[in-house]
Amino acid sequence: MSNPLFSQWVEMSQEALKKFTETQSAVLNNLGNQQPLNVTSMAEMMKASMQSFQQLTNNNTAAFNNLVSNQATSLKLNVSAEAIQKLTELMGSLTNKAIQQQTALASECMKSFTNYLAKLHEVKNAEDLTGLQMKFAEELGAALKSGAADNAQLLGSLQSTMTVWTEKTLDKTIES
């Protein structure tokens, strides 16, 4: 029973039951003092009983509404909404950078391939072909190495960006 929501619910229910029991006891005590059974007394007793049920329902509804309102406020949904919006912006920016890097890498690879194809018609023998293929492989390797370094740098910035975002979100949660 350490859950605050459950504890509040139990307290609310116990209080409502106590009020209901007191009202019913008063009605029953009054019933015992009646001499002969008459329709008016019975109608008054039924009316009092219905009113106590209505009051119990109203008290439960008001307590539950208060409980829901308090819980919704304590969730700090505005902080969560702001955090999600900021995270979406950060991830969009990082995704754009990653796409730009991959596009630049593809462009470099295609440039090397275009140079390879353009010089292929100059090949006279196997030695020329091997030299051209080696040059293509070196250019392609340099482009891939540069792309890998760019990706590593982007991933490093992602880590620091996420750390800053997390710290700011937690600070806002604590402050509000």
Image (tube, grey):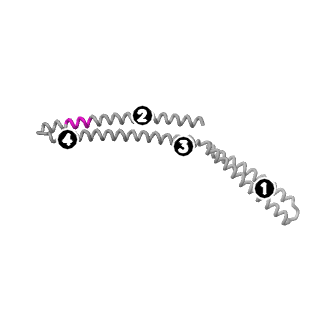
Q: Which amino acid, by three-letter code, is at mark 3?
A: Ala
Task: Looking at the image, tell me whether mark 3 or mark 2 is earlier in sequence order.
Answer: 3
Element type at mark 4: helix
State how far apart marks 4 and 1 are (Cα).
Answer: 100 Å
Q: Nearer the viewer, mark 3 or mark 4?
A: 4
Q: Residue at x 74, y 50 (%)?
A: 18
Element type at mark 1: helix
State how far apart marks 3 and 4 are (Cα).
Answer: 55 Å
Question: Residue 60 location, x and y as percent?
Answer: 70, 52
Q: Nearer the viewer, mark 3 or mark 1?
A: 3
Indicate yes or no whether the magenta region holds residue 80. no
Q: Which amino acid, by three-letter code, is at mark 2?
A: Ser
Which residue is nearer to you in this view: 40 or 172?
A: 172
The chief SS type of the magenta part is: helix
Q: Which residues are magenta?
A: 134-141
Left or right relative to 36: residue 53: left
- Count of numbered tags: 4
Task: Looking at the image, tell me whether mark 3 or mark 4 is earlier in sequence order.
Answer: 3
Bin the neighbour count of mark 3 within 10 Å (Cα to Cα): few under 14, some 14-19, many 20 and up: few
Element type at mark 3: helix
Residue 69, label in figure: none
Q: Which amino acid, by three-letter code, is at mark 4?
A: Ala
Q: Which residue is mark 2?
A: 157
